[in-house]
Amino acid sequence: MSKTLEEASKQLQKIDFCMLSTSGESGPFSTRPMSNNGDVEYDGDCYFFSYENTRKVSDIEQDARVGLTFTAPPSLLGKPGVFLAVQGTASLIRDKSQFEAHWVKDLDRWFPEGIDTPGIVLIKVSASEIQYWDGEDNGRIPLASRNAH
């Protein structure tokens, strides 16, 4: 039985860190860890805060296609881990009201002035497809139609 988008979203909310892959001038791709702070909506959107003057932001400005990979360890009951790969389109948000909507206290560690930290930007990744493997099941959840508008 295939997973639904809502089931995948619930799993993503439980995994704090993922790997964000971008493409840019300096190479075929670059990958770095990012925290989604549990900010994953059931419709397939993930949000990440960053500083403006980073390679990931300049990569996204050149090519908005990105990949996210999430991994959850095996359960204490022995169920295999969960692996999710998200293909999507990134957009850069510079609106402080959007910062407020997605801010969590733990972000103060990286952004000491909160949403007023100079050079802060919000990266929104809208999934076009999610692939998953959980040891018992695997499949794809296509979401291309939601990005076609």
Image (cartoon, helix red, strand yellow):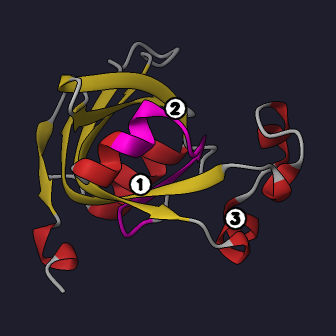
Left or right, 114 with respect to 137, comes to: right
Relative vertical location of residue 37 with respect to residue 101 in this rendering, above or below: above
Q: Earlier in the sequence, mark 2 or mark 1?
A: 1
- Distance, label 2 to label 3, CA atoms, is 16 Å
Q: Is residue 12 visible?
A: yes
Q: Residue 117 location in percent, x, y?
A: 81, 49
Q: Amino acid at mark 2?
A: Met
Q: Residue at left 51%, top 32%?
A: 34
Please give left or right for residue 140 compared with residue 19 in the image: left
Tell me which amino acid carries mark 1. Answer: Ser
Start-end of magenta stretch: 42-58
| Secondary element at image label 1 | helix
Judged by depth in the image, the label closer to the viewer, 1 or 3, is 3
Q: Which residue is mark 2?
A: 34
- Left or right? Give the position of 115 relative to 46: right
Position in image of residue 13 (x %, y %): 53, 47
Residue type beneath disc 3: Phe
Note whether 98 is above or below 14 in the view shown.
below
Give the residue number, with chain letter if any, for mark 3: 99
The foreground one among 72 and 85 is: 85
Neighbour tally class for label 3: few under 14, some 14-19, many 20 plus, Cα within 10 Å: many
Alpha carbon distance from label 2 to label 1: 17 Å
